[in-house]
Amino acid sequence: MSTEAIKTRFVAPAQRFSYADDTAMIRIGNSLEETAALVAMEVEKLIQWGAENGVTFDHSKETDSSSKWSED
């Protein structure tokens, strides 16, 4: 399945999930570099939202994960 098909079928352009004090973000790009840039933009938006709403994030609890799908 192509990256574009995965984007359209499974994940909206940017999705963030929050519950109580947990937040998750899913971003899909065509390369690791593109995905990292997309994540960086979303993190900035999330931090800005937090500042506007009196929410802080504990950066020591941050984790990330990446996967690569083959088009084979």
Image: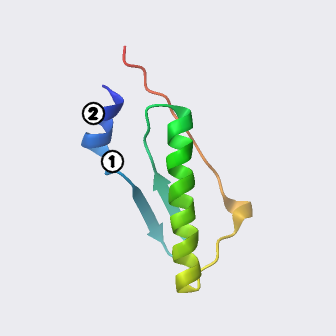
Q: How many marks?
A: 2
Q: Residues within 10 Å of mark 1 (few under 14, many from 20)?
A: few
Taking the image as drawn, is residue 21 in sight?
no
| Quarter holding residue 21 | bottom right
**Residue that appears at 43% across and 41% down:** 28
Point out which mark residue 11 bears. 1
Quarter holding the N terminus is: top left
For marks 2 and 1, give the CA distance.
Answer: 10 Å
Quick check: marks 2 and 1 in contact, CB under 8 Å?
no
Residue 57, position as x, y percentages in the image: 65, 71
Q: Give residue 15's position: percent from left, percent from top.
A: 39, 57
Q: Is residue 7 left or right of residue 65?
A: left
Q: Is residue 25 above or below residue 64?
A: below
Q: Which residue is mark 2?
A: 5
Label 1 element class: loop
The residue closer to the viewer here, 32 or 21, is 32
Q: Identify the residue at the far bottom of this view.
A: 54
**Label disc, if present, on residue 2 of the rendered structure:** none
Return the disc, 2 or 1, that comes first in the chain's sequence: 2
Is the C terminus in the top left, top right, bottom left or bottom right quadrant? top left
Foreground residue among 4 and 26: 4
| Quarter of the view holding residue 14 | bottom left
Amino acid identity at mark 1: Val
Three-letter code, disc 2: Ala
Q: Which residue is painted at 49% across and 28% down in the image?
A: 68
Residue 25 in view of the camera? yes
Residue 3: give x, y in percent of width and height.
35, 31
Residue in view at x 26 percent, y 42 percent: 8
**Seen from this angle, which residue lies furthest right?**
60
